[in-house]
Image (spheres, rainbow, N blue to C red):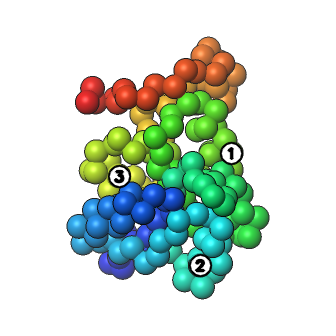
Amino acid sequence: MSDEPIRLFIVDDHDVVREGLAVMLATQPDFVVTGQAASGDCVVEALRESPVDVILMDLEMSPGMDGIQTLEALRAAGVPTPVIVFTVFDTDDRILHAVRAGARGYLLKRAPREELFAAVRVVRDGGPLLHPAGAPRLLARTRGGAGGGPAAPTAGRTPHGH
């Protein structure tokens, strides 16, 4: 564990979400938001100029590159920064595509702020993170076990019953 703050970069096409995340993350003494972008188009170049510890990125963005395309561009450019995909979508296909494209974490936007804070720390420290609602289905699917088919979206349901 380092005494240096965790440097974060936020990518979301909705200004209010991006700005709200920046304000919320700044409440943590060990976090500092060093950059923001409205699409994936300028992320690779921005991170070459100013590296960060964790990227928090929306999956569905337009216009420009969406989260999957941005993940692929980051990996193709050799940017090693871990990415947490922060999205409203928890369908198996979206989770699987994000993980295959290089996401280290997958967290739903309806997650409590404490989960988000913990996710940033886990991913920065090298651990993977999947939102509890999607983890069992994803593991079963990647192993070819039961539940390996596409699942219906579960929007509106959280693991905490909120």
Amino acid beneath label 2: Ala
Residue 17 sits above or below residue 34 on the image? above
Residue neighbourhood size for the residue with mark 3, other residues' Cα within 10 Å, grouped as few (<14), some (14–19), many (≥20): many
Residue drawn at 60 percent across, 85 percent down? 49
Q: Which residue is mark 1?
A: 100
Instruction: Identify whether 34 is placed above or below 18.
Output: below
Q: Please name the residue that numbered disc 3 is placed on.
A: 116
Q: Is residue 96 above or below residue 65?
A: above
Q: How many marks?
A: 3
Q: Nearer the viewer, mark 1 or mark 2?
A: 2
Describe the element under mark 1 as helix, strand or loop: helix
Kind of residue indicated by mark 1: Arg
Instruction: Report the front residue among 24 and 51.
Output: 24
Residue that protrudes farthest toward the right in the picture: 76
Which x, y percent locates residue 111?
34, 42
Rendered image: mark on residue 46: 2
Q: Secondary structure at mark 3?
A: helix
Mark 2 vs mark 3: in front = 2
Q: Residue at x 57, y 48 (%)?
A: 60
Q: Residue at x 49, y 59 (%)?
A: 12
How far across and down, in percent of the image, does residue 29 sit? Answer: 24, 72
Q: Is residue 46 among the parts visible in the rendering?
A: yes
Q: Quadrant of the C terminus?
A: top left
**How far apart are the two marked residues, 1 and 2, measured between alpha carbons?**
23 Å
